[in-house]
Image (cartoon, rainbow, N blue to C red):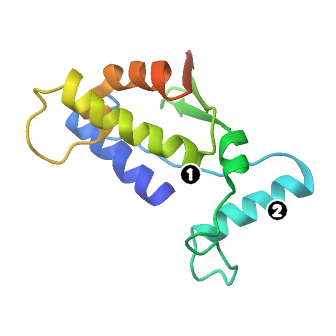
Amino acid sequence: MANINTRNVHRSNMLLGFPYGKDFVYDEMVMTGPGEQGEALARKVMAANNKFSGVEVPKPGEGPSKEERENGSYDLLFVAIAPDGRQVRAAVKGDRDPGYGSTSKMIAECAICLLRDTPDVAAGIWTPGAAMGDKLVKRLVDNAGLTFAVEK
């Protein structure tokens, strides 16, 4: 998702008036766990992002089972490094499969947040963070099984 996420993060920075600066750089890397199992999972994730890799990805209807969706989870770590070397780390955890279980809850909470909590958002093309910010974070924690932690 790096291609999409990079554009989303840079657009949010612009829409919010460049709180991260105009020279802000965003990049991603995939870390899926230790050993051969982690390497195999990383290859699968990367193959899903590269249709020319020659690795077959699931077709519609071949995704994870209900049990896999409900028992899945994720734990993401974002590390921001300032030009002077200062770091901020943010962790995001979810209680369901990220592609199926959590995404649907996030979309629903975005819709409810736009309707109930941020009705004054101007027309245009907004990112969720820029349009809803902390109001959306609260909804995701309260209703969607996500947790957020920031350490400076």
Residue sitting nearer the eye, 120 or 68: 68
Q: Which residue is mark 1?
A: 99
Q: Quadrant of residue 135?
A: top left
Q: Which residue is mark 2?
A: 40
Helix or strand or loop: what does disc 2 sit on? helix
Q: Quadrant of residue 21?
A: top left
Q: Is residue 96 left or right of residue 36?
A: left
Label 1 to label 2: alpha-carbon separation: 18 Å
Across and down, in percent, residue 78 comes to: 57, 34
Across and down, in percent, residue 16 comes to: 23, 31
Residue sitting nearer the eye, 88 or 1: 1
- The extreme front residue here reads 66
Q: Quadrant of residue 91?
A: top right
Q: Residue at x 34, y 41 (%)?
A: 23
Mark found first going from the N terminus, 1 or 2: 2
Q: Is residue 6 left or right of residue 53?
A: left
Amino acid type at mark 1: Gly
Q: Residue at x 74, y 65 (%)?
A: 43
Q: Residue at x 29, y 31 (%)?
A: 112
